[in-house]
Structures are given as C-alpha cells and as structure tokens.
C-alpha cells in the first residue's frame, strides 16, 4: 500500500522501525521537493525556525515566528513543485525544551497540508500536495498519533 495519496497531502506518523517496500515509498511522478529536518535539532522554537529556514530555503523576509512560518509554507513560490514532502526524523523530540508549543507546531503542519489540498492550488494543471512524515520509534509513535488525533478533534 502506497504512502501517498495522489491528490491530497496529510500529516502522518511513521514508525522508523517498520519496513516498507521501495515502491510504496516513492511518490507519484511530478516535480517533488523533499525537505528534511531533525526534531533532535529543534528543541525550541528558534531552532524550529532555523531548521525550516534552511530546509525550505525560506526568503529573507521570513519573520521568524509561527504566523510567518505558516505564511511561507503556504506560499513556496520560490520553490515550485507539484508535491512537497517534509520529513521530520525524531519528530517526538521537536520542541522538547518547550513542549507547550508542540500543539502549535503540529497544528501549523496540519494547516499547511490542508491548505495545499484546497481548491485552486494547482501548478501545471496538477494539484499541489504537501505531505508531512513525522518519523519516530517505539512508544513515541502512539503518543504522537494521539496528539494529532486530539488536534484533529479540536480543529
């Protein structure tokens, strides 16, 4: 079973200890931008912003705050593609120095993914998809899935 929906991105938790068939890991054809950040290097919000600034080559006008990150990730004109894949390894360690911000972070990722799945987001006649892979292992998988489900119920 492929990890990718052809027309809609989503935020999903991926167990780093699960084996996948190579064919299931490859996204559909098209222009794909893959950005990788490491939750272990994102202990606080400034480190989150720094990781995203570099991974997505954010413009110099990036405001180094949550609304600015959301705005930039819902634009991405400087990095055109039909599919964006954001891979966050050690996702459970993101914002470990300020866990109260993790909900804001996860909600932002969900908002961005949902935005790109909305009507009118097409490039070259194809829908633009923004996938987020929250990669972690062990008990962190179910904890992160629970956090996401809780956010989805609230939103």
Image (tube, helix red, strand yellow):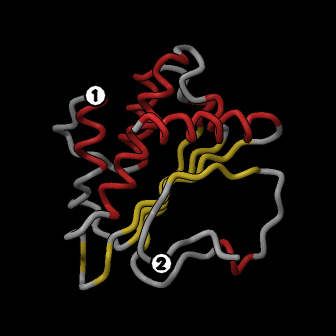
**Picture layout, residue 46 above or below residue 85:** above
User: Given this view, does label 1 or label 2 mark the residue nearer the observer?
Assistant: 2
**Picture layout, residue 152 above or below residue 96:** below
Would you say the residues marked 1 and 2 are in contact, meaning their CB atoms lie under 8 Å apart? Answer: no
Q: Residue at x 35, y 46 (%)?
A: 111
Q: Quadrant of residue 39?
A: top right
Counting residues from the start of the chain, the first of labels 1 and 2 encountered is 2
Where disc 1 sits, the SS reads loop
Q: Residue at x 24, y 77 (%)?
A: 123
**Picture layout, residue 69 above or below residue 134:** above
The image shows residue 75 at horizontal and vertical percentages of 22, 54
Q: Residue furthest left?
A: 61
The numbered disc on residue 64 is 1
Q: Residue at x 42, y 75 (%)?
A: 7
Where disc 2 sits, the SS reads loop
Residue that carries the numbered disc 2 in the rendered image: 6
The image shows residue 122 at horizontal and vertical percentages of 24, 75
Report whether 143 appears left or right of 12.
right
Report whether 76 appears left or right of 106.
left
């Amino acid at each position: 079973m492929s990890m990718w929906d052809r027309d809609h991105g989503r935020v999903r938790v991926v167990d780093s200890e699960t084996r996948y068939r190579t064919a299931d890991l490859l996204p559909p054809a098209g222009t794909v931008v893959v950005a990788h950040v490491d939750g272990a290097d994102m202990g606080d919000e400034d480190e989150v912003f720094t990781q995203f600034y570099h991974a997505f080559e954010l413009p110099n006008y990036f405001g180094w705050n949550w609304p600015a990150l959301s705005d930039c990730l819902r634009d991405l004109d400087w990095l055109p593609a039909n599919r964006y894949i954001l891979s966050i390894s050690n996702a459970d360690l993101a914002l470990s120095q300020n866990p109260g911000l993790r909900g804001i972070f996860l909600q932002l990722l969900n908002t961005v993914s949902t935005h790109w799945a909305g009507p009118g987001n097409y490039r070259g006649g194809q829908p633009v998809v923004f996938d987020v892979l929250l990669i972690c292992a062990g008990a962190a998988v179910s904890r992160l899935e629970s956090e996401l489900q809780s956010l989805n119920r609230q939103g």
